[in-house]
Structure formats: C-alpha cells, structure tokens
Image: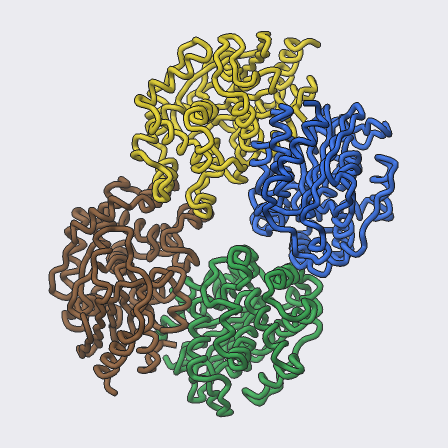
Chain colours: A green, B brown, C blue, D yellow
Amino acid sequence: MDCQEVLEFLHQQVKDEKNEGKIASYIPELKKVNPKNFGVHFRSVDDKTFSAGDAEKKFSIQSIAKVASLSMAIELVGGQLWERVDVEPSGNAFNSLLQLENENGIPRNPLINSGAIVICDVLISELANPKEEFLKFLSSITGYEVNFDPTIAASEKEEGYRNFALTNYLKSFGNIDNDVEIVLDFYFSLCSIKLSCAELSNLFLYLANDGVHPKSKKQVISKSNTRRINAIMSTCGFYDEAGEFAYRVGLPGKSGVGGGILAIHPGKYAIAIYSPRLNPKGNSYRGMKFLERFTSKTESSIF
Amino acid sequence: MDCQEVLEFLHQQVKDEKNEGKIASYIPELKKVNPKNFGVHFRSVDDKTFSAGDAEKKFSIQSIAKVASLSMAIELVGGQLWERVDVEPSGNAFNSLLQLENENGIPRNPLINSGAIVICDVLISELANPKEEFLKFLSSITGYEVNFDPTIAASEKEEGYRNFALTNYLKSFGNIDNDVEIVLDFYFSLCSIKLSCAELSNLFLYLANDGVHPKSKKQVISKSNTRRINAIMSTCGFYDEAGEFAYRVGLPGKSGVGGGILAIHPGKYAIAIYSPRLNPKGNSYRGMKFLERFTSKTESSIF
Amino acid sequence: MDCQEVLEFLHQQVKDEKNEGKIASYIPELKKVNPKNFGVHFRSVDDKTFSAGDAEKKFSIQSIAKVASLSMAIELVGGQLWERVDVEPSGNAFNSLLQLENENGIPRNPLINSGAIVICDVLISELANPKEEFLKFLSSITGYEVNFDPTIAASEKEEGYRNFALTNYLKSFGNIDNDVEIVLDFYFSLCSIKLSCAELSNLFLYLANDGVHPKSKKQVISKSNTRRINAIMSTCGFYDEAGEFAYRVGLPGKSGVGGGILAIHPGKYAIAIYSPRLNPKGNSYRGMKFLERFTSKTESSIF
Amino acid sequence: MDCQEVLEFLHQQVKDEKNEGKIASYIPELKKVNPKNFGVHFRSVDDKTFSAGDAEKKFSIQSIAKVASLSMAIELVGGQLWERVDVEPSGNAFNSLLQLENENGIPRNPLINSGAIVICDVLISELANPKEEFLKFLSSITGYEVNFDPTIAASEKEEGYRNFALTNYLKSFGNIDNDVEIVLDFYFSLCSIKLSCAELSNLFLYLANDGVHPKSKKQVISKSNTRRINAIMSTCGFYDEAGEFAYRVGLPGKSGVGGGILAIHPGKYAIAIYSPRLNPKGNSYRGMKFLERFTSKTESSIF
C-alpha cells in the first residue's frame, strides 16, 4: 500500500469501529460540533500530501496553538524562557494547580495550561500588538491567513474560572508580569483558532524540517529550537498520556480538546487528525487509534 | 571531524572543565570509585566502534540494568505487563512513594524503582531460576559473560530500607506476588552488575537495531517492543530530568547512580558514558554534558 | 498571684525576652505597625476584666474576623453550611490550593482562606446588604460600633492574587455562587476590621458563654453552635500549628496575621493578645508564648 | 434522666436504628466478631460507673493502645520525644505514607500508625524487656492484668505489608533505631490487646484525672503530660475525622479499627463504647452516633 492507501484504509477501519469518548463540553461552542467528523491530512517535507475524510473541515485547534506561541516566544527571548517555565512532563492533568504550589509557581512545561499562560505573558511583554503580531507570525509561515474566533474566545472566558485561578496563582508567585485579564484575553484568543487538518499539517510542517517551512522557505525557528520543541512535545504533548502516546505512536505531537492531534516525524512529515470525541485523558479517541496504527503500519515511529 | 575525533575532542573538553556533582554515597561500594573516572564508548549498528578515556573500566551500572530486565519481561509476558505497571513519566524522584498511594500501587513506569521491582517480581514468577536465567539472557546477547557483584548487592541490601518500604507497599496493594525478600534479592543483584562502557554499548546495541544484536544476530526482543522500550526510555529514563534530557540530548536513554548513561539512536548507534559525579537529579554530571554536546555536534538528536 | 498579677507578670516576662519573628509584609498597611506593640486583655463571663500593655491599641484583626462571619452564617443557614465546607484540620498553610484539587472544591474548614471565602459567598447570598448587615451584626453584640478599614481592604485587594486564585478555583468547582469580585470585596473588608484587645475579648465573649454575650444578654448564636465553633477553632484555628496550639495552650482560639490571637475558655473567659511579629507558621510569636505560660500558670487548659 | 438512664436510653435508641458500616476485614481475627456486639461503659473520677449492653465483652482495642504507649514514652523521655514525631493533625488516612515523604520521615502525630511505630521504637530503646515492661505498666494502673493476644498479633503481622512499608520508610529517614522486625513485633503486640469497655474506661481514667488513677492513686503520667495527651487526642484521635469528632462529640478521644472508642472528659469521666461496624473513615459507626447524642444530652462537650 502506498501512503494514500494506508491513510484511506486506516481511516475507514477506525471509522467502522465504535466511536467512543465524549466531546469536550465545558464551553458551548465546542459542544456544537458533529461527533462524526473525522479527517486526516499528511504532508511530507518534500511536499507530498495525502488525506482522508473531513480533512478540509475547520475545527478549534485549542491547545495545539500552544506549539505556535512557544515557537514564537523561544525565538524572541531564547534560553531565558526556561527561568520561568520548566521542560519536564507534569504527570498531572492539563489544568492542575498542584505542582505550582510545590514548585514556586514555575510551570512544569510550556504545553500545560499554566506554562502556556506564562508564554502568553512573555509574548505580551515582548510585542507591541501581541494578538496582531501573533496572527501575522502564523500567516507568514504558510501565506494563508489565520484568525481568532471571537465567539469561541468569549465562550472560553466565560467558563474559564480555572484558568483565572491558574493565572492569579502564577501572579502571586511573581511569574506573570502583565494584567491577568490581558494575559487571559490573549490566551483564550490563542485557543480559539480554527484550522482544518490540511491547514494544521501545513502550518507546523517547519517542525519536520529543521525549522524551515519547505514551501515558503521561511525559517520559522532555528534548527536547535526545532529539536527542542519536538523534544518537549514528545515528553509533554499529551498531558498525563504523554508516555502512552510515545509508547503507542512514537512521534512528537500535541493534542487539543477540540479533538485535533498534530504529530511530527522529524525530517519526514507532519500529520493532523481530527475527531472530536475524547478519551478519558482528553485526547481524541479516534485520533490516538488512527495514529497508533499509522506509525505501526508505516513503521515510522522515531524509536 | 570524524566520529572518533568528535569523541576525543568532547571528552577532552569536558575533562578540562570543572568536575562538579557528588558521587552516590548511600552504599559504601559506590563511594570507593575514583571521581576522575571518565570514559565513553560509541558503537554503531554497522559495527563501528569509537571510544575515549576510561572506556574499558568496569563500573556498577545500577538502574541501567532495568532496561535489560524490562526487555526480558516484555518478551516473556507481553502486553499484560501493563496491567501492573504504567508507561507514564513520574515527575518525581526515582524512589518516591507518593504516586503509589494515589494510584493504587501501580508504578508510573518500569524504569523507576517501584516499577523495576514489579518487573523483578514478574521475572521471578516466570522463571525457574531467575538469577541464573537472567544472567544467561544477558550473556547470550553478546556472547560475553555477565555477572552480579555480590559485594555491591549485599551493600545495597543493607541500606535498602526505602526499597523494602516500596516493595512492602506494592505488596499491600497486591502488586507483588512473591516474597519481599526474594524480590529484593533479585532486584539488588540486578543493580549490582558491573560493565565497562564498551560492554554496555555492546550489550544494548539491539535497541538501536530493531531488537536484533547486529553482531550476534540474536533477536533479543521484537521490533515493536524495541520501539516501545526506546519510547519508555525517552519519556522516563532520567527520573525527574527526563524532559531535560530529551530537550538537551534528544535520545532515548537510561542513567544509573553509579555514574553511567546509556543512550540509543534508533537505527544508528548505542553510546555509553561513565563519570561517577552526579548532578542534583542523580544523573552523571559529565555524562549529561558530554551527550548534549555530542548530539549537538553530530546533529544526531532524534528530534 | 491573682489574675491581674499573672497577666502583668507574664506580659513583663515575655516582653523582657527577645522579640523574634517577622511582621506580615504582604501588604503595606500591615508593615507599618510598631513591632514592639504588645497587649493582652482578659474578660471573664462574670464581667471581670484584666489587662496589660497595649490592650487598647487597635490592630488589624485579619483572620480572627472569620470566627464572626462563621457565627453569622451558621445561624443563617444551619447545617446545610457543611455541604459546602468541611470541619477537618487542613494540615497545610492557610492559603494552600492543594487540598481543593483532591477534594472537589470543598474547603477543609471555614477558618482557612478558602473556607472563609465560601462563608462570605453564603452571607452575600443570604443578606440584602452584606457589608452593612455584617457590621450591624458585630455592633449589636457589644453595643460598640465596628467598622471596616477601607485602606487595608484596598491594600489586600491589590496584592490578593492568591485569594483571587482560590476564589476562581472554588468557582470552577461550582462552590461560589456570586461574582468573584463581589465575594472578595466582602472578604477583604472582613479582614480589614481593626479592634483593640479589649474590644476583641469583648466581641467574642459569647463563645465563652454558650452563645450569649453576658453583658448585652444578646443570644448571638445557639448553645450547640457555640460548642461547634469552639470545636472548629480547637482543631483548625491555627493553620498547620493547630495541634501545637492545642498541645501547648489547650484552648480553642484563632489567630490573625496582624499579630492578634483570640482564645476562649468555654464557660469561663475570652482572652485577646496582640504582638505583630509572627512565627514561621504565621502566628504571633509573643502571643503564643504568653498564652502557653498563661494557661499553664492558671491551670486553665480545657484538657 | 440520670446518667444510667441516659446510657440505657441512648444505647437502646441507637440499637433500634440500622447498624451500618463494615467490620474491619484486613485480618481474619477481626472479621470473626459478632457485628451486633454493642456495649458502653462510663466511669467518673469519683468512682461512679454506669453501663449498657455488652460492656463486659472483650474486643481488640487496636489503635486505642497507642494512647498507652504514648503515655509511657512521654514519661520516659520527655520533651525530646517531639524531635521524632510532631503533634499536628494529619488530614490523611491512618496509614498514609504521603506526608512522611514531604516531611523527612517525621510522623505528623503519635496516634497515626507511623507515629505510633516511632513511639514503639522509643520504648524498645528505653526498656530492657519492652513487652513485659509495657504490660506491667498497664497492669499497674488498675491492678488488673493486661495481656497481648498472640493470635491477633500474628494475624496482623501476616497482613501488615503497609506497616512494614511505613517502618522501613521511617528507617530510611533515620527515624527508627531498632530492627524493623523487632519494632513491628512490639507494635503488633500492642495492637492485639483485648479489653472490655469496662476495663478500657478504667485503664484510661487517669487521663480524666490529671494523670492520677483515682482508684489506685497511681500517678501514671504528670498533670501537664495528661493535658498534652488529651490535646493530641482532641486534634488527632480520629484520623481524618478528628475535626468531625470534635465538632459532633466535643471530647478528646481515640478510636480503634476493632470498633472501640475511648473518650475523656477532663476532670470528669472516661467513657468506652464498642460496636464493630466502622464508618468509611474507620471509626465505629454506632460509637460515633452514641457519643454525639451522649455529650449533647448530658451537655458535657468540653467546648
């Protein structure tokens, strides 16, 4: 089977099996999606693309956006970023406050909520117009326009008590420089971005190509920062299921509660999957299943 | 520079810098080593070897042996192993009891003490003569004889209160089938194995070659189990510094408090470093430094 | 020695010893006080009063006010209060978020910050004009007017990130009904009350007299609620030093970071001490010392 | 109603209600008891005794014995005891290991398992024949012989993995001086003592009388140590239900998983209840119910 056949075969196979798990329901906007949505899009560094199902359907990428804000921040401030956030797996749920108390307000890594909020604070301090410049940064990567979804952002804010708790808590440790409201306004905007699988695999293809987007030739981040972000995704990209993902799938990646998963094979490809039902750990049920079979069938685990 | 030159250059460079950290002192046998010992040995899947410094000096491999017992157990009992131990990073020190209490006696992963003790219990249940058969398993990989060091094992036992605590605790949850004394006798023997860097990189070369040792052609473990073990080392091989190691070095690996580090580049090579002074997380100070520079200079991070 | 002599003797004795500890510095208003302030006031249920030192100097009673808000809430809503807050010692610092995460947003007891914030939320829901009615409740007990200090309240709010974190966190669990801003405005007002030792021992004398203030004859709370509040103070009144206080002093009581301590001998007396330097647990250094010697000398521990 | 009538009335009332909860089942010896057993015995410092139900039936007093070992140890070594064990409520289950890890092996208080094990270690170091001398100490209080039950002790040992874990863990922190086996042999013997309610209230009557047993006139412990032990029982006597017990019952006390509860009214009386079904926190279901009604009806809470 060639790659397109594998994609179609596995997409059909997973589709034929029971679709388990629950759609994220903490905000109304996420609840509205069709649970049957199921798309996958593969894009190689040498510009081959394959897809199956709802690969062009837009969805809320949620936490996957944290990889983009981390990319931007690491280039802007470099190594001093790690004085404010660590790179260790958390071993806890994505919105846990537990470790912050024992670790003086230094989030475990930049891909859990607390860490991503600190990254937002860094960007706000560094940028004159954070939201505009962040969107421009994203759009410059592929040439396609990327936008926030204000309805989703507003919905997040309305139910975001735990994120308000986290941010105030971080600020009590002195690890937030800007106003809590401003930091979270940026954070909720970030999480509200909607992309299709096709756009997602395109946007993050630079992570599979030493930091350079192969089409636009833009050097998004340095080669060494690319390796570091892939390493962080590998150990921290799936909350308390990061080990399971490495074990089953064997690729660096990042999931979002919207049902999206991005995975990177360094040097080879980016792949995006979307299916909104989530397993108990908050990762796409079908996405995890599909990816496990995909790297197994194509023998493309990095391990 | 070719690989031998890189090895020699970095070995000299790190040697010229201050040798920080502390030698493990919890057992007398470990305290006796010369803090200046510093060796490195590289072995590729196509049988090229390079080395520098004390590459032939034997040292106590300690926790690195857990990779071997995991290899043997995963082949013997397969997937049902994961009913008794998880594959998630612990985010805690190697001998922590904290998570066991919240997680019903299921260790976070097979490379922390509690998980490795469960693996020992599994091997004892599966094997007629556990210690003999385990040594035979190791010796069969390379053809060289491997032995326990009874002095070190006895020394471990004498000071092993925390491991006795862990094992009794696991047993209180029903996750140890055999006698505590017998399980720990095996565990302490395991940790007492002494190998040189040259022997270490040779022994575990199968992990870089889809489970087959390239010289002996022995299929030590299956291809898919090889990937899984590499994945587990990648997320869990360095206790609460696993993320840091992935971030800085970018290879699956495992360290021991004796000062050894094993790292694997899947498809390419195994490398072993030995230097007994440990950083505050319990990993070889010079070993970490050397490996970070090595994968950076040779651009051989897997990410 | 009679009681007045004991008071004077111990006051002088403690005053002659080194005044250790630190003044609370998290808000500017608290930092301004004179560290040498040291007063004590004793008031018995049969209307005898004795005092020493700065017994008439007003200070910020801070968390001691939580006993008053609890008194008011328990009378208003009765036993259903305990569906939203527990009565167990926390074993953690006063502003810890740790336990809330494991216990679904139910604070351990009404005298730690999180519990007191829930009590404020209850009062806001029950009262038409919470702040006015609360002050009226306090003033009605003794006949003396009690007021908030707006400067202190504003100062608390400005630095109150951890309390904003706690309240948002409680709200994320559904355990806060009103707006976070409104709840904390009430909470910070509560903590800003300034009283002298003489006023403090007078205000809470009802806790020593089965709920009835002996002078005004007002039944502030029922007899059984009096016993319950004394029990809660006894197990939870001194954060993670509650056991120590019971062990050394042997009276129900409550401390505040302003340096005040209130202690109650059920059936006999109320005593208030003020000295602003705090021990590492956040309780008045001289206050603890004085009370230990006082109950020892007068043999008036309840145990 | 006089006291005897109250006892009989409440005994009958509770007996007529559903007997909920579970008998402790972790050792076979405890499982064998009749769940309907229900006795109560009251003894005042002026030698009045009242009882109802199975007040003469012997049962395993289990953890209540920890009050006796603490009494003996505190007299033997005095204040230096508190360098090895704290006096704070634990906020956790009786056999938790969690806090030990964060608190360097210092148990929270002497009435949870870890703390009682340290007390046993202290007694073993201080006494030439610990078991004999401890029994002699107990027998000397009332003049009645007290004995260990070897069947129960052996049964405890067989299933005591968690206590073996705790003791090894304490030893790893250097907080156990003697052999783990010897310490636990003493600890399990301690827990195996069988007494009736009548004997129990008699044995511990010294705690209600400033340390002197009113009948034998023996000064068991000093007056100040009596107050301290009562204070510790008050904050720590019922594991994570200590606050609830203070709130509902309002007396210092100690429970055991055998279904016994001892409560002390300082200056007035000791009362013992026995009913083997336990509530989810491990305290006698009927015992808690009876005592709450008893102190309410007799208005004898200390608060």
Q: Residue at x 16, y 55 (%)?
A: B135
Q: Position of residue B131 (x, y in %)?
A: 17, 50
Occupied quadrant, residue C281? top right
Q: Residue at x 52, y 55 (%)?
A: A102
In the rendered structure, the answer to whether residue A291 lies left or right of residue D301 reads: left
In the rendered structure, the answer to whether residue B161 lies left or right of residue C295 reads: left
Occupied quadrant, residue D300? top right
User: Which sits in the foreground, A8 or C93?
Assistant: C93
Q: Residue at x 35, y 18 (%)?
A: D133
Q: Does residue A151 show up?
A: yes
User: Which sits in the foreground, B276 or C225?
Assistant: B276
In the rendered structure, the answer to whether residue B75 lies left or right of residue A176 reads: left
Q: How many marks?
A: 0
On-image quarter of the C terminus of chain A? bottom left
Q: Is residue B148 above or below residue A180?
A: above
Q: Is residue A276 above or below residue D258?
A: below
On-image quarter of the N terminus of chain A? bottom left
Occupied quadrant, residue D207? top right
Q: Position of residue C257 (x, y in %)?
A: 67, 47
Q: Position of residue C158 (x, y in %)?
A: 72, 61
